[in-house]
Image (spheres, rainbow, N blue to C red):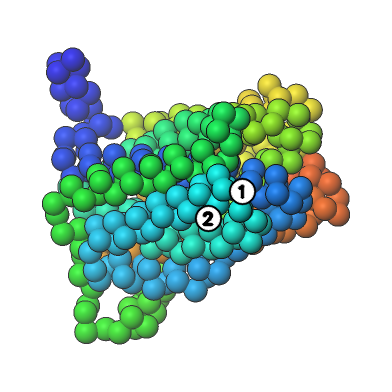
Amino acid sequence: MNGFIAAMLRLRAFRPLAYREFRLAAYGQICGNFGTWMDEVSRGWLIYELTDSAMQLGLVRGIQVIPFLLLSPLAGSATDRYSRKTQLIITQSVNALIFAGMAALIFTGMVRPWHVYVAAFLAGMTSVFQQPARSTMIGDTVPSELLTNAIGFGALVFNVARVVGPAIAGSLIVVAGTGGAFAVQSLMMVLATIWTFQLTGTHRTPGRRKESFTQSIVEGWKFSWRSETVRAGLSCTLLVSILIAPFTTLLPVYARDLLNVGAPGQGLMLTAMGFGALVSAALITAAGHRIPRGMFMLVFSALYGLVLVVFAASDSFALSLAVMFFAGLCHVNGNALVQTVLQSHSPPEFRGRTLALFSMAQVLTTGGGVLIGALAVSLGPRWAVALMGIAGTLSIIALAVAVPKARAIR
């Protein structure tokens, strides 16, 4: 076994694992993402169970727009100025309390729709600060020559949780209800905090501390706009986030009403998507800098929208699972590669602020979730997903034509 591990670590794709700090960060990321991806199923299922409303599926995600919209610049600046480890410990601990509180409300029969909205808002606040801290920590734990491989491995770790988490949540809902799912989510966040505590580095790239937070935020925006590579990556993420990625908002409608597979079926669909993302992340990790990242992120983002058209038309659960696999494959190639581009082309003192802008794509995803929920009410869920997918593909093609240098990003 030791010989196998040694041979694996000699491969460039797995070389970041030779560094203790990177391993601890990866363990914490796995546990934290288990909780996050379980929440993707349990929160949506709970609000649909309580309200029977597709519109409220979009609104419960839309409530997270507010903290991302208001606090992302502040979170990015804090990540560049202060301890990323402390930022993670605080946010993960708060998440554990939020999930535990939801479990208690459900088990006592006191849960109401407004509780779900409050929990979604608070979880959004913690995610705002958690995401740039976790992402930039990757660059703190490995040498610069392994940064691309480490980022790819981080995407791999993320999608391991994405594969398993939704299936666990769906099974727990059947066995122990949504309360059981939220209780396990809380446990995952506690474990993530324990791993993070064991990090020994400072995990801080001090910014120019004489600057005010406002000046620091503005400087981050200026850098992201001046760098054509960073600007192109953020534009691609913007289009995918508002027009394509929000289709997962309607998965409870597809699972319960169109495909008749219930909560376990919803979990399996997200698992299939996660497995596609896992395969894609593994390929990125192995290939590293050899991937033509600009071309890949544009092509696979455009394909992502077309895949949704097939998903919208499917009446077969087996076909829907296959389509979700390809959706995950496209999602990582159009998303994780953007993150790799941003970190590779941003100096350490700007990474937190650049990745905070990247994480603000969730504002657009939540806004897109509200839009697709409204379209589902007026046109039906199938037409809503299909039209959003087509619009997404056309917008990515327009970006590739308007910004030809985006295709040449390495």
Residue 325 in picture, x, y percent from top left? 58, 30
Amino acid type for the residue under numbered disc 2: Thr
Amino acid type for the residue under numbered disc 1: Gly
| 233 vs 295, nearest the viewer | 233
| Distance from the alpha carbon under mark 1 to that under mark 2 | 40 Å
Give the number of marks. 2
Q: Are marks 1 and 2 in contact (CB under 8 Å)?
A: no
Residue 173 in picture, x, y percent from top left? 58, 34
Residue 204 in picture, x, y percent from top left? 20, 63
Residue that badge 1 annotates: 109
| 275 vs 395, nearest the viewer | 275
Query: Is residue 83 at all visible to an observer of this figure?
Result: yes
Q: Is residue 276 above or below residue 45?
A: above
Q: Residue at x 55, y 44 (%)?
A: 107
The answer to whether 145 appears left or right of 219 in the picture is left
The answer to whether 164 appears left or right of 363 in the picture is left
Q: Residue at x 42, y 61 (%)?
A: 126
Residue found at the very far front of the displayed protein: 108
Q: Quadrant of residue 220?
A: bottom left
Q: Quadrant of residue 259?
A: top right
For label 2, the SS is helix
Q: Residue at x 51, y 39 (%)?
A: 181
The answer to whether 39 appears left or right of 410 in the picture is right
Q: Residue at x 38, y 42 (%)?
A: 187
Q: Quadrant of the N terminus?
A: top left
Query: Is residue 399 at all visible to an observer of this figure?
Result: no
Residue 382 in picture, x, y percent from top left? 79, 41
> Where residue 237 is drawn, which disc sits there?
2
Question: Callout 2: 10 Å neighbours few (<14), some, many (20+)?
Answer: many
